Amino acid sequence: MAEESIDENGSSSSSSSSKGKKKKTKFGMMMSSVGRSAKQGMSRAGKQMAKGVVKTKQLAVEKIAKIPISQEDPEVISALERLKITKNEIYAISDIVRNLYEARLNEATFLIQLADKLKDTKITQNDPFGLYIQKMGIAMTSLESIQSEHLKRMEEELVLPLEKFRDIDIEQVQKLKLKYKNCKTQYDVACHKLTKAQDSQDQNKIQQAQQKKDAVAANLQQLRNDIKFQVNNLEQKKQVNLLGCMEQYWTSYASFAQAQSNVLSKNTIQKESYIQPQQQQQQQQQQQQQNNDD
């Protein structure tokens, strides 16, 4: 698409380009968006499978070995709850925003087609309908330029920041959570084996089991610390970085709405009156008579 700029009054300027190039660019944006959505869907499926494997492993250990589950760290429980809330909120918002963006891309494509069609309307004599829709097409062209610029900003300031926060920041902590859950299961198994070794009163087994438990416990404690730190860090990114993007988009949206309003104000269309053929003929005769008298 040609480079465009919009001032506060809603006026726009662009370099010369063909209608075909504009439609092709819009189509390219749509296809790129569809490709990203499909890739994200496959990525999510893989993540769900990984979570399922960890959960199945944990349940299998509990069921087969009847291993007692040790208490969770209250601070870790609180951190994981905050992670869950953030994850659910951002995933829901991000999905809606992506769908809205793609719908507006689709709408913009049809707006271009409609504007071009209306502008190309052939005007005949005594044709207020043709005059009106032709002016509509001219106004719609200006609106389409504003909307195209807004879609670029929407992608840069809203769609991509949300998806980056979801797919990188949240998922990084999610992976750490799965690692922690797996280590927690290993710790519970180690505790159970130590108890069995103590029941056997075999000092060699007790020593080995104790060493295994201590090693896993150290790793588990490190993961607990990492979980709490990373969840706090994630919250900070949401409250500072992501919030900054949301604020920037809302400012852009206000400018977009104002620019649209300015275009509509400058393109107020006055409907002309339609003269019925018989009445038109009488007016022509009267005009001719008046010309003859003069």
Image (cartoon, grey):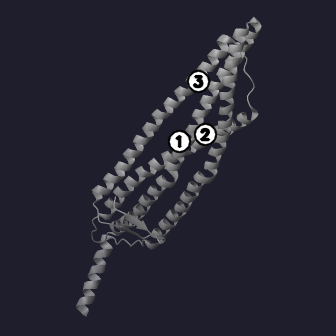
Q: Report, in whole angstroms, how far the alpha carbon at label 2 lies from the one at label 1.
A: 12 Å
In the displayed structure, would residue 172 be above or below residue 102? above
Residue at 74% from the left image edge and 22% from the top image edge: 70
Q: Report, in whole angstroms, how far the alpha carbon at label 3 lies from the one at label 1.
A: 21 Å
Type of the residue with mark 2? Lys
Q: Which residue is mark 1?
A: 168
Total numbered circles: 3
Res. 242 mark: none
Q: Position of residue 10 (x, y in %)?
A: 45, 69
Label 3: how many residues lie within 10 Å, few (<14), some (14-19) or many (20+)?
Answer: some
Front one among 105 and 76: 76
Residue at 64% from the left image edge and 45% from the top image edge: 233
Mark 3 element type: helix
Closest to the camera, between mark 2 and mark 1, is 1
Q: Position of residue 229 (x, y in %)?
A: 66, 41
Label 1: how many residues lie within 10 Å, few (<14), some (14-19) or many (20+)?
Answer: few
Mark 2 element type: helix
In the displayed structure, would residue 287 be above or below residue 276? below
Q: Is residue 80 left or right of residue 91?
A: right
> Can the viewer see residue 67 in this picture?
no
* Label located before the other in sequence (3 or 2): 3
Res. 87 mark: 2
Say whether marks 2 and 1 touch (CB < 8 Å): no
Type of the residue with mark 1? Ile
Front one among 110 and 24: 24
* Label located before the other in sequence (3 or 1): 3
**What is the quadrant of residue 89 in the picture?**
top right
Front one among 118 and 103: 103
Q: Which residue is mark 3?
A: 54
Residue at 32% from the left image edge and 64% from the top image edge: 119
Q: Position of residue 137 (x, y in %)?
A: 36, 64
